[in-house]
Amino acid sequence: MALKYDTGKIISNKTKGSGHKKKKAQPLVINPREEWVIVENCHAAVKTEEEHMKLLAMLEKGQIVPNRAKAGTYALSGLVFCGKCKKMMRYNVRSDGYSTNSIKACNKYDHFGNYCSNSGVKVNILTDFIDRGIADYEQRIIDSDNYINTDVIEKLERIIREKETQLTKLNRALSKIKEMYEMEEYTREEYEERKVKRQQEISALESELAVHRYEINYDSREKNKERMKLIKSFKDIWSSESATGHDKNMIAKMIISRIEYIYDKGTYNLNISIQFN
């Protein structure tokens, strides 16, 4: 492998965030090269810089790119599945790597040699269905008991942050009172009096926080708030003429887990279902 640290360097700060799909995390961002932290001579070099560049050139020259990789990523790549056999469906791609804007017919055989007869379908039929599905999904969130106006959420979040800061300060003050008593700065009576007062203030603040957290209902309303942000991003990217298939695919996978369809060309009967994350 052509690893840069084999030249004796250690490189850090190349990225920030993680963009994890199922965990709360900052989006993955690749930092500009000028922001990388490169430390020279951290260990014995396995190769020189010149040898490293020659090796990269050799690897690039001899690299074999699979046909599927040449095809690139399309808006619905990895999201469309056969409703009969559950196999992932693929785009129809020309020999020059361009998509025909259609999904290939399912060609899977089961263990008994039976052929899945699910037909191919035009991509625009699926995207029209997705647009309607996203609109319905957005309306269900708005209509649910766990949806709350964004302005109200932001106000509650600000109050919670302020009270959490106060709570941290009170806990520090309580610890400080104990330290002062241990240093014999307070008498036993003074220590008990101050300790009880701080504990009462902490208890009252924790009760207030519990009420505000119940009002905002983090477990469901916070998730719906994030969903609404994703839906807006989805609409912006999918309606943008400059967005690439990769851009559309990335945002689609953050909202949609899978799209299944069954299409019978003989009867023109088409059933589509969509599952959201």
Image (cartoon, rainbow, N blue to C red):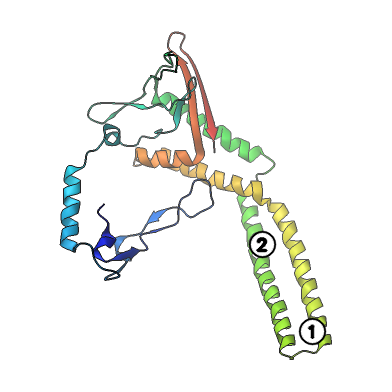
> In percent of the image, x 67 and y 39: which residue is there?
144
Inspect the image, locate mark 2, and give the three-letter code of the amino acid beneath it: Ile
User: Residue tagged by mark 1?
Assistant: 191
Q: Nearer the viewer, residue 85 or 32?
A: 85
Q: Is residue 43 visible?
A: yes
Q: Is residue 239 visible?
A: no
In the image, residue 156 sits, relative to residue 114, either above or below, namely below
- Residue 97 occupies which quadrant of the picture? top left
Closer to the camera: disc 1 or disc 2?
1
Measuring from the top left, give residue 269's x and y in whole percent: 49, 13
User: Residue tagged by mark 2?
Assistant: 160
In the image, residue 242 sits, relative to residue 118, either above or below, namely below
Indicate left or right for 98 with 78 as reference. Answer: left
Measuring from the top left, give residue 212's x and y in whole percent: 71, 57
> In percent of the image, x 41 and y 38: which residue is there?
249
Q: Kindly state the secondary structure of the residue where label 1 is placed.
A: helix
Badge 1 local density, few (<14 within 10 Å), some, or many (20+)? many
- Residue 39 occupies which quadrant of the picture? bottom left
> In percent of the image, x 64 and y 53: which residue is there?
153
- Residue 91 occupies which quadrant of the picture? top left
Q: Kindly state the secondary structure of the residue where label 2 is placed.
A: helix
Q: Nearer the viewer, residue 144 or 59?
A: 59
Q: CA distance from mark 1 to mark 2?
A: 30 Å
Q: Nearer the viewer, residue 111 or 77?
A: 111
In the image, residue 68 sits, relative to residue 120, either above or below, namely below
Measuring from the top left, give residue 14's x and y in whole percent: 35, 60
* Quadrant in the picture for the C terminus: top right
Q: Nearer the viewer, residue 29 or 11?
A: 11
Inspect the image, locate mark 1, and give the three-letter code of the amino acid beneath it: Tyr
